[in-house]
Image (cartoon, rainbow, N blue to C red):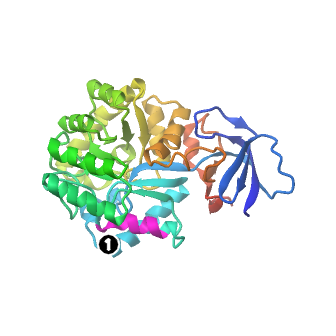
Amino acid sequence: MKEYIVKTKGIIDGTGAGLLPNGEMIVRDGKIAAVGTSLKAEGLPVVDLSGYYLLPGLVDSHTHLSIVPAQGNQLAQMALPAGRNILRSMPNIRRQLESGVTTMRIMGEEHWIDLDIRNAIDEGLIEGPRIFAGGIGIVATNGHGVGLTTSDTPYEVRKNIRKNFAKGADFVKMFMTGGMSSSRPPVDFCGFSREEVAAAVEEATRMRTYVAAHAHGGPGVDLCIEEGVRTIEHGALLTDEQIKRMCDKQMWVVGTFSIMFHPTGIEQSDFSNPAIKAKVLHNREVEAETFSRILASGLRYAIGTDSMHGLISYEMECLVNFGASNMDAIVAATRSGAEICMMEDRVGTLEAGKLADFIAVKENPLDDIKAMAQVDLVYKDGVKLVDKRA
């Protein structure tokens, strides 16, 4: 159907505005033509979702394609041959779609498989969310995040970033600090010099995009703030001073909670490594408190599954548990994610002129955010890709 009207029990448009009861939406040629009530649509085919609540397609602002955390040793997974990891990515992509995710920001893959998969989706060869891709991650030889490619010195940072952009990358992913899924280095370790960070930001700015930095806390976050990095990924150890400075610089933090807290995350496999287990258990103690402070500060935030494919609803639940309202959690997974993906003119909200990416849930997530765990229908560009109704 090139043009049709969707009738709903209610629309939550992703802007932060309240529920629109009995909302209607006209879709024309894959885009939203109108949203409202009692729309004039004589003769148009009707998609009757009058028992459902409609929301924008969700945005997973931090994930990977080939990694499955429950299998353990994520960095070794990323270093597998390109063909194998493309195949390993296919079920993960389907899980994302079925959870309501229609846009993903991919935070580093070897062999540029994220770019190949993005292009295959765009060409219609496979079904999947639209992808905002970082290419191969920029990581120091002794840093967290090493798969196959490392970048030491400003020269190598520039060289590898330029290779990514030549292949079609949309932004730069940089591993600034230690991480949870590797035994070394420490979480607050800083892997790059000021000169290397400045080089990365300069290269990204030249391409009219930005640097996203894996960073939990410590001096690595300070360098990111001072040198113009746009998004801090994870941010579990942010101090009040760092949060304030990030607010002043209009930066973002992207929370990734399920990999830390969900039983199918790191604990399912890598807890056999005492160093990793100690990191994760400590992080669980501090992350909830950190994000409660972030929510109170006014710092802009979004959420991502970090390869916990299909668990974007769990990320939203965690936000609510940390003190966000249900509406704020919805905005974090829609409008805010679209802004981080530089797609706010196309996706993230249900407004006239935007692409018709939308999902349907049976219960009202403003009453209970757990309603987001059961997405029954997923449309992308106005085309139904998922229908779980019996």
Q: Position of residue 182 (x, y in %)?
A: 20, 52
Q: Position of residue 362 (x, y in %)?
A: 66, 46
**Dominant secondary structure, magenta:** helix
For residue 76, what is the image quadrant? bottom left
Q: Residue at x 29, y 41 (%)?
A: 229
Q: Is residue 226 left or right of residue 100?
A: left
Is disc 1 placed on a helix, strand or loop?
helix
Q: Is residue 190 visible?
A: no
Residue 118 on the magenta span: yes
Q: Position of residue 320 (x, y in %)?
A: 48, 33
The quadrant of the rendering that contains the C terminus is: bottom right
As shown in the figure, which amino acid type bears the numbered disc 1? Answer: Ala
Residue at label 1? 82
Residues 122 and 297: in front is: 122
Q: Is residue 210 above or below residue 118?
A: above
The quadrant of the rendering that contains the N terminus is: bottom right
Q: Is residue 96 left or right of residue 364?
A: left
Q: Is residue 249 left or right of residue 313?
A: left
What number of labels is visible?
1
Residue 270 on the magenta span: no
Q: Position of residue 62 (x, y in %)?
A: 39, 49
Magenta stretch: give its range. Answer: 111-120
Q: Is residue 326 above or below residue 264?
A: above
Q: Is residue 379 above or below residue 279?
A: below
- Mark 1 neighbour class, 10 Å CA radius: few under 14, some 14 to 19, many 20 or more: some
